[in-house]
Image (tube, rainbow, N blue to C red):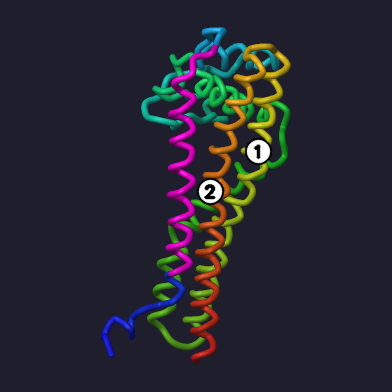
Amino acid sequence: MPMFYYYFDPTYSLVLIGVLICLLASARVNSVFARYSRVRSRSGMTGKEAAERILRMNGIYDVRVVHIPGNLTDHYNPGKKTLGLSDTVYNSSSVAAIGVAAHECGHAVQHSVGYAPLSIRGALVPVANFGSAISWPLILIGLLMNGEMSALLINLGILLFFAAVLFQIVTLPVEFNASGRAVKVLESSGMLYPDEVGAVKKVLRAAALTYVAGAASAILQLLRLMIIGGRRNNNE
């Protein structure tokens, strides 16, 4: 019998499925964004101009729109009160760029009105970061030990990883809501024509899939850890 058989863990398939889902979602958003980044909005408004206009429309004057490097690295920083737009969005007048800029403005509006899921996600950030960093070391150490301490470390690692998974899950309504706000303001303000808003919807739906994929991947990894932990407890 081949030697690798003894070391093959069927739960690796859960990790591979998660990786595949994330790769497909990433490829999809890049493809859709690239397609509509070549479609210039008829207003000629850039991502920066759209963001500044949307912020003012919502009475937000303390958030700066800044240019950041990268591709689709756009984000809102509530601590610094900055809305970062990437190279492909900041000076671009494409419908894709305006859609992404509007989406990030959606997060600024969430922060301004005290949108609960955004506050919960913000509170989870340090816990999720700590859980992601320390969960696997604890589990690996637990697997190398025996007795009650082994089970304790494994279960603690799983619990900490669950915090990271919870962060991914809470992120979903935050992102969906920001996209909904973006579409609504672009429709109601007349910044884009109806067919252009339709293109924005496609871009934002593709972007939303990356968050769904991230959450699904995290859940699959958590399931794997639970299987490994349960298997170890049954063997003792």
Residue occupying image coordinates x 52% and y 58%: 218
Q: Is residue 115 left or right of residue 6?
A: right
Q: Position of residue 74 (x, y in %)?
A: 48, 29
User: Which of pointers 2 and 1 indicates the residue nearer the eye?
Assistant: 1
Q: Tell me, for residue 126, which label it has, or none.
A: 2
Residue sticking out furthest to the front? 195
Q: Tell me, for residue 176, which label it has, or none.
A: 1
Residue sticking out furthest to the top? 43
Residue occupying image coordinates x 63% and y 25%: 198
- Image height check: is 94 above or below 116? above
- Image height check: is 235 above or below 73? below
Q: Nearer the viewer, residue 140 or 35?
A: 35
Residue type, label 2: Pro
Residue type, label 1: Phe
Q: How many marks?
A: 2
Indicate which disc, 2 or 1, sits on the residue closer to the N terminus: 2
Q: Quadrant of the N terminus?
A: bottom left
Q: Tell me, for residue 96, which label it has, or none.
A: none
Residue occupying image coordinates x 54% and y 65%: 222
Magenta region, mostly helix, strand or loop? helix
Q: Secondary structure at mark 2?
A: helix
Q: CA distance from mark 2 to mark 1?
A: 22 Å
Q: Position of residue 122 (x, y in %)?
A: 60, 42
Classify mark 2: residues with Cα within 10 Å, few (<14), some (14-19) or many (20+): few
Residue occupying image coordinates x 41% and y 83%: 145
Q: Is residue 150 magenta?
A: no
Q: Quadrant of residue 41?
A: top right
The stretch of residues the image draws in magenta is 13-41
Q: Quadrant of residue 56?
A: top right
